[in-house]
Image (tube, rainbow, N blue to C red):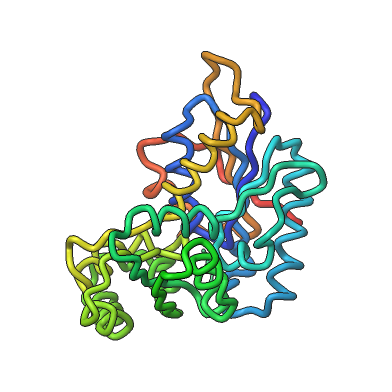
Amino acid sequence: MNQPIGIFDSGLGGLTVLKALAQKFPGESFCYVGDIARLPYGNKSPETIRKYGVQILDYLKRENVKALIIACNSASTVFLNEKHYQGLPLLNVIGPGSRAALAKSADKRIAVLGTSATIRSGAYGKTLRQLDPSAMVIERACPLFVPLAEEGMSADDITLAVARRYLQDIKDQAIATVVLGCTHYPLLKADILKALTPTTQLIESGEVLAEELSQLFAAGELRPASPGSVGELRIKITDLTDHFERLALQLMHPLSIGPLERIVL
Ligand code: DGL
């Protein structure tokens, strides 16, 4: 196995990021940690989220990864300006997501959906306004989306009703660019688009991180896997349930993943 890239999230949601990266870079190996024993992160304090994040980064470092990616938006907010961790490149989703939103938005009116922790931190709003002081940003916490996604309730009337409750005023204000500022939200994309309008431009963490990683390779800041290598995907979780395993396999299809491994941090 070539030297993997480490990636973590609080749970299932980060697999949307892992899949996007593995499809874009099939020669790279990835080592993913999903901290499902302590999910959700989105209703915890910055101190607790940071403590969990450090434990996982240390674990990944011991797994000999060549770079570290914080897929989780809630965890990204507490490592916002850190570009390295103990000598390894460290990526988070907030900067790349903000840049992608501004690049795609014609009128610079952007809505950001996230967990309570992400929205409370104001990380997206601050980053967007730093990048473009004329940007108009609405940040909206959608705390029920994570449990709905973890329960596999996409394209479901209950999820649609919740999405309408959270998103009606964003729709009324005709905001055309919406950042899915939580890795779980792409799993509910159909419901979110139905509650907004089908033409809404959704910015997803997986796509923006794939772009960011391309730039790191292009800039020579990270060594790509040697040509012709076939990447491996290792998924490690802090608790193992049949439910998680089933959803993980479904979500990663058609990519093949090794057996899920339960770890202690
Ligand atoms: N996936 C995490 C994020 O991107 C949130 C899920 C949670 O609350 O743990 O923010």
Which part of the image, by quadrant, shows the C terminus? bottom right
- Residue 78: percent from left, percent from top: 67, 67
Is residue 179 positioned above or below 116 on the image? above
Front residue of 188/50: it is: 50
Is residue 91 positioned above or below 151 on the image? above
* Residue in view at x 65 percent, y 24 percent: 2
Which part of the image, by quadrant, shows the N terminus? top right
Residue 3 falls left or right of residue 58: left
**Residue 60 visible in the current orientation:** yes
Q: Quadrant of residue 77?
A: bottom right
Q: Quadrant of residue 107?
A: bottom left
Front residue of 12/221: it is: 221
**Residue 142 visible in the current orientation:** no
- Residue 145: percent from left, percent from top: 40, 74
> Which residue, as the protein is rendered here, is positioned at the far front?
134
- Residue 169: percent from left, percent from top: 27, 84
* Residue in view at x 33 percent, y 54 percent: 104
Front residue of 261/174: it is: 174
* Residue in view at x 76 percent, y 67 percent: 51
- The number of numbered badges drawn on the structure is 0
* Residue in view at x 60 percent, y 31 percent: 219
